[in-house]
């Protein structure tokens, strides 16, 4: 079945460091791919998304590119801030006909000043 | 716009008790879902709905019931609570199949 695998956390970085959080997926067809972020005590909120191969989603300095050949959707940011400390979830939504989102286990990011 | 609201915020139950977690949205979204979040397991889909009167099972539906009589409301019922249902529960809604999901603030449930 469909699945999402994320790198284990926690990830601890200094402010202004480069961030990569790896995400790979298994799915039939062409799913839509998402990154959600969860700040402490809150629900998830969408960070970015991509709906077809080679699409690049971007928001707030974060980027991720839909790579069909490697079934990956890695999250990157060039210079992290303390305010980026949160848990990041990679997710997919299967092609039309279903409405079943599959989430990864989440990666906790801690940015130190 | 209140977005997605959930009540209660916290709940403690004894094994065997029943209760309903409430979820409402005011964005006229057709799609709504319930998830549970457990440490190391991410979010797992319990039930979802693609419109009033239409519901379907997700990955972990056992022990939970849902109904969708209106577009706005999507309550989740625990029939006979078990310690394994101790978790944080999130409700979400979206406009369409590939659209952004909007999440509520969550309900932290403890079953003793």
Image: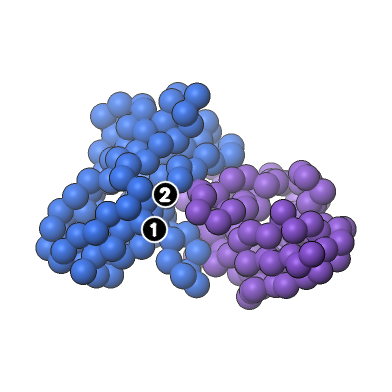
Label tally: 2
Check disc 2 and report the residue beneath it: B106
Residue at image point 75% right, 58% down? A82
Disc 2 is attached to a residue of which chain?
Answer: B
- The picture quadrant where one finds residue A85 is bottom right
**Is any part of residue A8 visible from this angle?**
yes
Residue A23's place in the image compared with B29, above or below, is: below
Q: Is residue A56 above or below residue B52?
A: below
Residue drawn 47% across the image and 59% down it: B43
Secondary structure at badge 1 equals strand
Q: Is residue A29 visible?
A: no
Which label number is shown at residue A57? none
What residue is shown at x 32% (from left), y 42% (from top)? B7
Mark 1, chain letter?
A: B
Residue A48 % position (x, y): 70, 46
Residue B54: percent from left, percent from top? 32, 35
Asked whether, in this view, residue B26 is left or right of residue B70, the answer is: right
| Colour mapping | by chain
Marks 2 and 1, Cα distance to the nearest angstrom? 6 Å
| Contact between labelled residues 1 and 2, with CB atoms less than 8 Å apart | yes
Front residue of A64/A62: it is: A62
Q: Which mark is residue B88?
A: 1
| Chain B visual colour | blue
Tell me: A44 left or right of A69: left
Please tell me how crowded label 1 is: few (under 14), some (14-19), or many (20+) other residues with Cα within 10 Å.
Answer: some
Which of the marked residues, 2 or 1, is nearer the chain's N terminus? 1
Closer to the camera in the image, A2 or B28: B28
Q: Which chain gets the purple colouring?
A: A
Q: Secondary structure at mark 2?
A: loop
Q: Position of residue A1 (x, y in %)?
A: 50, 65
Q: Quadrant of the C terminus of chain A?
A: bottom right
Residue at x 58% of width, y 54% of height:
A38
């Amino acid at each position: 079945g469909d699945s999402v695998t994320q790198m284990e956390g926690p990830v601890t970085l200094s402010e202004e460091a480069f961030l990569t959080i790896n995400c790979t997926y298994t799915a039939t067809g062409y799913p839509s791919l998402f990154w959600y972020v969860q700040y402490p005590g809150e629900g998830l909120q969408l960070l970015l998304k991509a709906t077809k191969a080679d699409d690049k989603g971007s928001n707030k300095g974060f980027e991720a590119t839909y790579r069909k050949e490697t079934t990956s959707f890695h999250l990157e940011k060039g210079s992290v801030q303390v305010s980026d400390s949160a848990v990041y979830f990679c997710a997919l939504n299967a092609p039309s006909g279903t409405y079943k989102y599959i989430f990864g286990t989440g990666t906790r990011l801690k940015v130190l000043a | 716009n209140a977005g997605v609201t959930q009540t209660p915020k916290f709940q403690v139950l004894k094994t065997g008790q029943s209760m309903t977690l409430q979820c409402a949205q005011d964005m006229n979204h057709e799609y709504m879902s319930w998830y549970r979040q457990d440490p190391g397991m991410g979010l797992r889909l319990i039930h979802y709905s693609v419109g009033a009167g239409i519901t379907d099972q997700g990955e972990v539906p056992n022990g939970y019931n849902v109904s969708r009589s209106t577009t706005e409301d999507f309550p989740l019922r625990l029939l006979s609570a078990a310690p394994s249902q101790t978790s944080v529960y999130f409700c979400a809604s979206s406009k369409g199949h590939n659209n952004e999901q909007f999440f509520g603030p969550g309900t932290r449930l403890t079953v003793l």
